[in-house]
Image (cartoon, coloured by chain):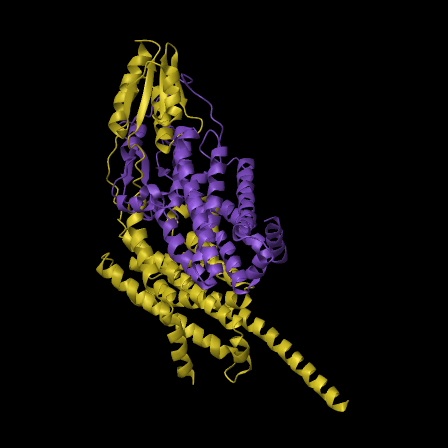
Amino acid sequence: MFFELMKKELKVYFSNKVNWAFVVVIPLLFIGLFSVALKDYIGADYGTFDDGKEFYYLNVEDGKYVDRLNVIIERLTESTGVCFERVYDIEQAKKDVEKSKAYGVITVNADGYDYYRSPYNETEGGKLIRTMFVEMAQNEIENIKNYPIVVSNNIEVKVSDVDSYAYYTFTALAFTLMMLSVGVSLSIYDEREHQTIIRYRISKGGIWGMLGLKIVVGMIAGALQLLISFTFSTVVLGVKWGDKIGWMLLLLLLHNTFAILMAIVLGLKGKNKAISQDMVFLITMLSAYLGGSVTPVYLLENIPVLKLLVKISPLYWTNQALISLYNDILDKKTLYSALISIGLAFIMFLLIAVGEKKKHVVMIVKETDDKKDKKEEVAA
Amino acid sequence: MLAVMKNTFAVFKTNKEFIMTIVFQPVLLFLLMSVLLPYTKEHSIGVCNESSYESSEYIVDSLNGLDGVRVEEVKKKDLNDKLMNSNIEVAVVIMDNPETNSPVAQVITVGGSEIETAVEAVVMGTNLDKVSDNDIVHVNKVKKKGINISTTLAFMIFKTLTSAMLLGNLIIEERRNKIRDRIFLSGISKGAYLAGMSSVYFLSLAFGTTLFFVIGHLFNFDFGMKYTVGYLIMMWLADLLAVAISLCASALVKTEDSLWVFGSFIIMPMALFSGLLFPYEFMPKSLKMIGACFPNRWIAKGIEIMQRTGGLVEAVPYMLMLLALCIVLFAIATVKTKRVSQS
């Protein structure tokens, strides 16, 4: 009986083209797009000084501040690649700065410098050049020219293997596994809408039989998504999953189980189909953002409040553990990730159980009332 | 039309979740995402000062004085991890040099950094005697800004487009339950029906957008432009586009499920290629070209142009493109609704 129902469930699930798209297209799209699109960003190549230009205006033709400016121009051009252009109309130059045609205008006066920056849209490159200029302008020429500090690179740094391909193979995969649960949520809502859920409740297998089927189907879809993503990342992106692949798969499957149970809870509680799916989607998106599946996690960890907030996302723990395992490190992160997925799955299970118990009590009360009414009718 | 508008408001009143989903949830999300989406071009520098010379602090001061970079103190034992995990991009280690009786600094990166030479220049340019001409540079004062709205923009456009999908849902539901037929029988024209429902949705979305705009001003958000009203105009256009897309989709598909497919496979990719999940400017050229074809990008581009040039006029072509698209979508929806009703 169970296998018959299972066959039916699988048939229903995979006859829906949208579900196929979630299993096959979405992970490939996300892993592929993220890996390629954020390649420069992960490498912090922001193009900070690209096409950078600075204007300068001379109120005096010579003197120590003009000489100093010439040395600064040389130093800044050498270290940042920004080009300097002399202007003759200061008001027009200021207007041009506001239109982002240059970072700023340096005016050389007899007693020092004026620096004009845009009040609305100063870029990061512009900020850097301005502060570098201010720092250098306060020094005598000798200090700018002579390097009092030796710069050499003799500290050994272990280079990480995690490039954008590896990073997004794991983090985007954990994200899409969670997204897969939208299908489960919709399927539960359909059972409610068509009232088949009531039949399950009064049947021999009970509601848990039906939920078990949904969980197994979700797990099969998740396993399929894993297989497809593994093949894609290995063959196309050249990501080597390494020796800890068993642990990685275990964590991903535990994460998948939690996501399915969460979708079941939302499918059972949602008042409207659109709102129900919107909720699953919203939770998934938020978890992904906080978990580092979209924005690289180091950026989130660099922000004081977010540093703590990221930890509420189950995806954060899964992603951290997966990246560690990818670096061949089996540590506490793996244990935390597994425990969090199991713990959250258990909470979801309890929520379902409590909800169903309430429904069961309502049904018994209704049944007793019906019997009472019937008895009264017979007696009358 | 007024009757349809009243009826739509009544639906909103009955089911408060609609108002939550259309108006307040997006605003809350926008505010949350303004903090959560830290895509920034700010570089990060780690400073590890191990020198016993007092003058080594001048180097730290020079680095701390840099705008556009984040400087944090790092212990030597954490250096490797911080660099490896990209928490910092450049490390500056300051040590003693007994030969010269002065501090020496090492600038370290993993695989290079575009600001490495700039950091070196700052470190090397530090005057260790600190006999400097203070107050000889006067920089114009600029109002300090808070959270930058640019990082949230693509997400806001996406959420606006998906929020309006509820309009499509309601239209399909009314069609399925034959409520719409009864409305038409009462003498209300198809155009008035669609216009009535759309205007209520548009007003709700625009209310949410305006609310975010006002809150943004109250919290000193950085709109990055001279005339911030330009931002509001573009976002109202986004609201209008969201209503037009939803209306058109509801006329083209038969069930609510199909509308969900539409949302997932048309709006989502549109948003993805327009910078929803990763900054548009970092995308490869080929992806940028695809993104440029979508209206999400036109909205973002209009705002970016206003930020860059400081004027509203330069963004007018994008506003007109959006308006034209909305008119086309409304026209398709009306024609299609009339045909379906006749058949």
Looking at the image, which residue sits at the far bottom? Answer: A379
Camera-side residue of A199 and B185:
B185
User: In the figure, what tint was chain B given?
Assistant: purple
Q: Is residue B160 above or below residue B144?
A: below
Is A215 located above or below residue B33 in the figure?
below
Foreground pick, B336 / B319: B336
Percent coordinates x, y for residue B284 in the rendering: 28, 45
Q: Position of residue B90 (x, y in %)?
A: 31, 39
Determine the residue located farthest toward the right in the rendered image.
A380
Answer with the quarter of the image where residue B120 lies: top left
Q: Nearer the viewer, residue B262 or A223?
A: B262
Chain drawn yellow, letter?
A
Q: Position of residue A118 (x, y in %)?
A: 41, 26
Q: Nearer the viewer, residue A220 or B230?
A: B230
Q: Position of residue A200 (x, y in %)?
A: 52, 79
Residue at horizontal 47%, vertical 36%? B231
Q: Is residue B207 visible?
A: yes
Q: Can I make out residue B131 in this image?
A: no
User: Which residue corresponds to the image point at 45% horizontal and 31% vertical from the top-left?
Assistant: B225
Q: Is residue B200 above or below residue A179?
A: above
Question: Position of B188 compared to B246: left or right?
Answer: right
Please tell me how many numbered marks the rendered image carries. 0
In the rendered structure, the answer to whether residue A242 lies left or right of residue A196 reads left
Q: Is residue B96 above or below residue A366?
A: above
The part of the image, by quadrant, that contains residue B295 is top left
Judge from the rendering whether residue B223 lies leftward or rightward of residue A133; answer left or right.
right
